[in-house]
Image: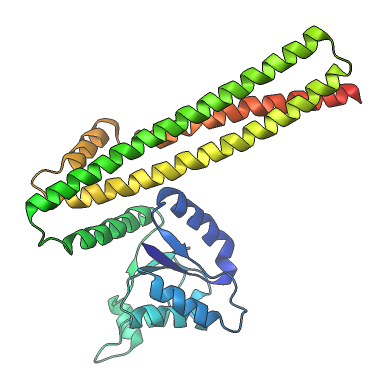
Amino acid sequence: MKAYVIYRSLDLEIVKSQLKIISDNIPDLELLILQDFSQHMWKTSAKKKIKEADFAIFFVGEHAHSSGNIDWELEKFIKYRKPIYTIKLHKDYKYNDVLFKKLTFGNISNAKNRGVMISKEISIDNLYSVLQTEIDMDISKDVLCHNDMPEEVMIEQYKAYLQTSEELLTRRQTASNFYITVNSGLLSIFTTVLAIINAIGINNSLIISMVSCYIISLLGVALCCNWKRLIISYGQLNAAKMKVIAAIEKQLPFNIYDIEWKVQTAKLGKRNYVSFTNIEKRIPVLFSILYIIVFLAAIVLTLIII
């Protein structure tokens, strides 16, 4: 699912902060955004992205209603009959005239007074639920395209797809075990090397210990960053699989996963529910803290030598 972002360049900073929140909460959504409108051929690039987009998110700033560029972008979405979701950055900001339908009798002012808008107004608070619904509907449409498939065939495909989800969890656990083993081994080797250096009393042992601290800490932090990115990637892939499974289940007699989620959220509440991905991400963070401590120890050794 792709969303084209419409905004006034003056509002870029506040729009960026909102887009960051959207990306964190809805990883399945691809945001299409133009940041340089000074280019001579910007409309060509914008038109290409608009055609790719499934809908538009329009951040209504103070001067957005007087922007010819924004009018052009909105007109394209209206022409292609694609949904437009508007978000006012302040309640007093005005909408662009192109967002109001032209009535058979009357003018744009009458349309405004009657609230006949082409777009759908949403708020920052319900933005995520609206966009998530849009994504779920898009997935359901893809599944419904094959609703003429015999139920036996659909069930077999459903079972096969469930198996890929289980295999994904197995690969994810194997990857986590690998990184835990590597990090534990790295720290064990580091402490062993330091112990040997101090026991033997090698010349310039302080310098060697300091260099070892720098190498181990930098290597460990890089390893943990890669580990965390891998966990996030697995989490996003698993979330996508669960959405597909939920969409398929709507065509089946019993929605097992949907009911399981309702029971879970009813018991804990959506805000109190902590996903396995969020829990798992804490492990590389904890290892990173250990490596940072080692790095700080290296700095202390450096200051002692100096």
Q: Quadrant of residue 95?
A: bottom left
Q: Please indicate whether residue 148 sits to the left or right of residue 104 in the image.
A: left
Q: Please indicate whether residue 236 sits to the left or right of residue 8 in the image.
A: left
Percent across and percent down for residue 78 are 34, 80
- Asked whether the viewer can see residue 275, the reply is no
Q: Quadrant of residue 134?
A: bottom left
Q: Please indicate whether residue 300 sits to the left or right of residue 140 in the image.
A: right
Relative to 189, residue 119 above or below: below
**Front residue (pair 156, 95):** 156
Q: Dividing the image into 4 quarters, which one contains the C terminus?
A: top right
Q: Residue at x 78, y 14 (%)?
A: 197
- How many circles with numbers are drawn on the protein? 0
Q: Residue at x 24, y 46 (%)?
A: 161
Percent across and percent down for residue 282 are 50, 31
Percent across and percent down for residue 158 are 18, 47
Q: Dividing the image into 4 quarters, which one contains the N terminus?
A: bottom left
- Asked whether the viewer can see residue 104, the reply is yes
Q: Residue furthest right?
A: 306
Percent across and percent down for residue 194 are 74, 16
Q: Quadrant of residue 234?
A: top left
Relative to 278, residue 131 above or below: below
Q: Please indicate whether residue 148 sits to the left or right of residue 19 in the image.
A: left
Relative to 214, residue 62 above or below: below
**Front residue (pair 260, 98):** 260
